[in-house]
Image (cartoon, grey):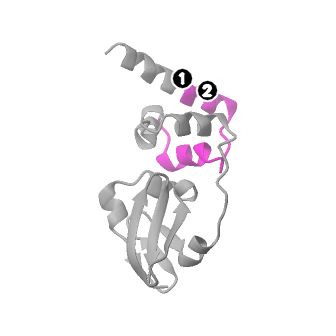
């Protein structure tokens, strides 16, 4: 597949192929891209098989754009919170509570399940942030 254009819009990565067809893939499956800066997203390489972001160590195969995989609503508490408030910066929240961004993303996306104590620590950090915002 030859890619003529690649862009990000809403919660999707889009490509335009050689025949002018626009295809999309949900970013839900790629938390590193969700949390990447515009510069990091722009730093990609195309291969015969797909797209690679060296700095992010992320890959998406061209084949994945051909399948219509439904994106389910988050079933976990953290997923629902972060989806409902997209202004929350996952990386900064993770730093605030002393865990890695990739672990917090895995919790949010339902890939990993936090312990009850860790989930409460994350929720408390969000509540504390809310209190700080109210004081402004």
Please report the bounds of the magenta region as a residue range.
98-124
Q: Residue 66's quadrant in the figure?
A: bottom right
Q: Are marks 2 and 1 in contact (CB under 8 Å)?
A: yes
Q: Residue furthest top?
A: 135
Placement of 95 over or under 38, stated as above or below: above
Instruction: Give the SS element for disc 2.
Output: helix
Residue 95 belongs to the span the image colors magenta: no
Task: Name the outermost residue toward the front.
Answer: 20
Residue corresponding to mark 2: 120
**In the image, which disc is placed on residue 124?**
1
The answer to whether residue 72 is above or below residue 60 is: above
Q: Residue at x 31, y 15 (%)?
A: 136
Residue at (56% x, 71% y) in the render:
65
Residue 32 position in % (x across, y down): 47, 56
Q: Left or right: where does residue 69 sit relative to residue 4? A: right
Mark 1 nearby-residue class (10 Å; few <14, some 14–19, many ≥20):
few
At x 56%, y 27%, the residue is: 123
Please say if 43 is above or below 120: below
Q: Nearer the viewer, residue 9 or 28?
A: 9
Residue 26 location, x and y as percent?
55, 59
Q: Which element type, helix, strand or loop, lies under badge 1?
A: helix
* C-alpha distance separating marks 2 and 1: 6 Å
Question: Along the horizontal axis of the image, is 125 left or right of 69?
Answer: left
Magenta span dominant secondary structure: helix
Residue 68 point in image, percent of width and height: 65, 66
Q: Nearer the viewer, residue 70 or 129?
A: 70
Residues packed near mark 2 inside 10 Å, few (<14), some (14 to 19) or many (20 plus): few
Q: Report x, y in % for residue 81.
A: 57, 33
Q: Residue at x 55, y 30 (%)?
A: 122
From this view, report whether residue 17 is shown above or below residue 26: below
């Amino acid at each position: 597949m030859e890619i003529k254009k690649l862009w990000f819009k809403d919660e999707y990565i889009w490509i335009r192929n050689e025949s002018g067809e626009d295809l999309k893939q949900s970013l839900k499956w790629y938390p590193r891209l969700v949390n990447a800066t515009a510069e990091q997203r722009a730093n990609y390489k195309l291969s015969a098989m797909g797209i690679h972001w060296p700095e992010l160590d992320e890959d998406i195969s061209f084949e994945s754009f051909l399948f219509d995989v439904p994106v389910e609503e988050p079933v976990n508490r953290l997923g629902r919170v972060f989806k409902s408030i997209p202004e929350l910066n996952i990386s900064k929240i993770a730093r605030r509570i002393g865990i890695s961004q990739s672990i917090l993303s895995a919790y949010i996306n339902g890939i990993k399940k936090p312990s009850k104590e860790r989930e409460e620590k994350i929720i408390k950090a969000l509540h504390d942030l809310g209190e700080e915002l109210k004081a402004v």
